[in-house]
Image (cartoon, rainbow, N blue to C red):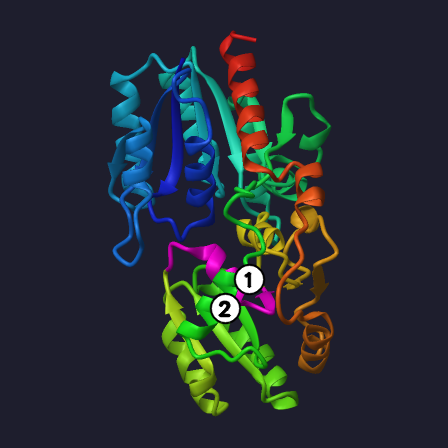
Amino acid sequence: MRILMISNHLGVQSGVQRYVQNLLLHMDLTKYRVDLFVGQCPPDQASSAPALEAAGVRIIAVPDHKKDRIRALRRHLRTHKDYDIIHYHTASKIGAPVCVMMRALCPKAKIIVHSHIVYPPMTLVWRAAHGVYQLAADYFLGCGVAAGRFVFGDHIDRRPNFAVACNAVDKARFRPDAAARAATRARYGVAENEKLAGFVGRLNHQKNPLFLVEVFAALAAADPAWKLMLVGAGEMEAPMRQALARHGLGGRAVFAGVQSDVPAYMNAFDLFLLPSNFEGSPVTLVEAQGCGVPCLASTNVPPDGAVTDLVHFLPLDAPLAEWAATARAIAGQGPHTGRWAELEAAGYELHTAARRMEQLYDQLGGRA
C-alpha cells in the first residue's frame, strides 16, 4: 500500500512532527510504502529525518514556507498519482483548498485529514473551510474532539468517518526515572530541596511564555526555593530573558535549549507549566503525565489529554496569585509516581495507537 503523509516540517521541536515521527517509527513499515512530504528542518532544531529514513520512510523535503510547500505538493502529485492513501496533517484554513487540489490530482486516493489545533476565534472563513474539508476528504481525525470540531465542523464527531487519534507517547521512554531526575538536576545545579518548574516546547506566542515568566515570578516571590527550566527555543526567548531580568530572576532560570532526551528533563521537574494561548492536544501534556509530573495548564488547552489527576487548569485571566498558589499546592517533590495504567486505558500508549492507525489504513485501502 502506498501512503503519502504530509506534515509541517522535520524539526523535532514541533509537536505535530514528534507525533508523526513516533507514529511512523512504531508502525509495521513492511506493510506500507510511506512517502513523507514535509518542510525542511528549521535551522534551530534537530531533524527527525535520520531516524525516519533509517526505518524506511522516503522523505520529500521542500522549502519550509507554506506557499512554496503547496506549489511543490502540486508538482509532486501531478507525477505521482498512485497513492492509495494521503494522510494530511493540518492546522489551517488553507488546508481546505489543498484537499480539493489533492482530490483533483489523485482521484483514486483516500484522503485522511488530521487536525492538530484549536485556534479561536471561529470565523466565517473557518466555517467555509469546514464545508470544503467535508466535501474533499474521506476520513477525519483529530488529536482530540475539540481539535476535530474546530477544523472540520461543530458536529464532525457525530459522523462515522471521524475518530480521535491520540497524541500517544512511548511508555518505555516517558516514565518516572529517579536516576534521570537526579542526574539532570545535578547537571544544572538544582538541589534536591529546591523546587523546579519546567516547560518543554517552542518559545512562541502559542505557548504564552511571557505569562509563564509572570507565573514563575509570583511563585518565586512566595517561595525562593523555586527555579525555572525551559527546554526549547524560539523567537520569544530574548523577551523572556528580559522579563526575568526585570524581576531579578535571571539567575534562577535555565534556558536548556532544544534537547533530544525530553524524558530526563520532564523527570527533573516538580511542576510542568503550560499556560498556552491555544493548543490542539499537546504531546507534552501526555509526556509529563507519563513521567508522573504534576501539570498546571491554561483552560485554553483542551482537556482531551488530561486523563490523570496530575493535570489542573486555570483561566489566563485568573490572578497570578491564584496561579502561584495552585502551583505550590499541586507541585510534587522527589520521585514521581507512574500513571501508565490510566494513560493506556485512555489510548495514549504509542504501540496501541500505531496499530489503530494501521487498521484505519487497511480499512480505507481495501485490506480490511
Residue 182, disc: 2
Rendered position, 352 above or below 288: above
Q: Position of residue 227 (x, y in %)?
A: 52, 80
Residue projecting furthest to the front? 179
Indicate whether 126 appears above or below 303. above
Quadrant occupied by the C terminus: top right
Residue nearer the viewer, 361 or 257 = 257
Residue type at mark 1 is Ala
Residues 148 and 293: in front is: 293
* Stretch in magenta: 259-275
Question: Would residue 66 be counted in the magenta stretch?
Answer: no
Is 290 above or below relative to 267? above
Question: Which residue is rendered at x = 54% and y = 57% of the image?
Answer: 177
Q: Is residue 216 left or right of residue 111?
A: right
Q: Residue 91, which numbered label?
A: none
**Quadrant of res 99:** top left
Is residue 35 in view from this perspective?
Answer: yes
Whether the residues at callouts 2 and 1 have beta carbons within 8 Å, the answer is: yes
Query: Is 326 positioned to the left or the right of 226 in the image?
Result: right
Say which element carries label 1: helix
Q: Which residue is mark 1?
A: 178
Q: Position of residue 139 (x, y in %)?
A: 57, 23
Cα distance between the residues tagged 2 and 1: 6 Å
Q: Amino acid at mark 2?
A: Ala
Image coords of residue 48 (percent x, y) = 33, 43
Query: Quadrant where the N terminus lies?
Result: top left
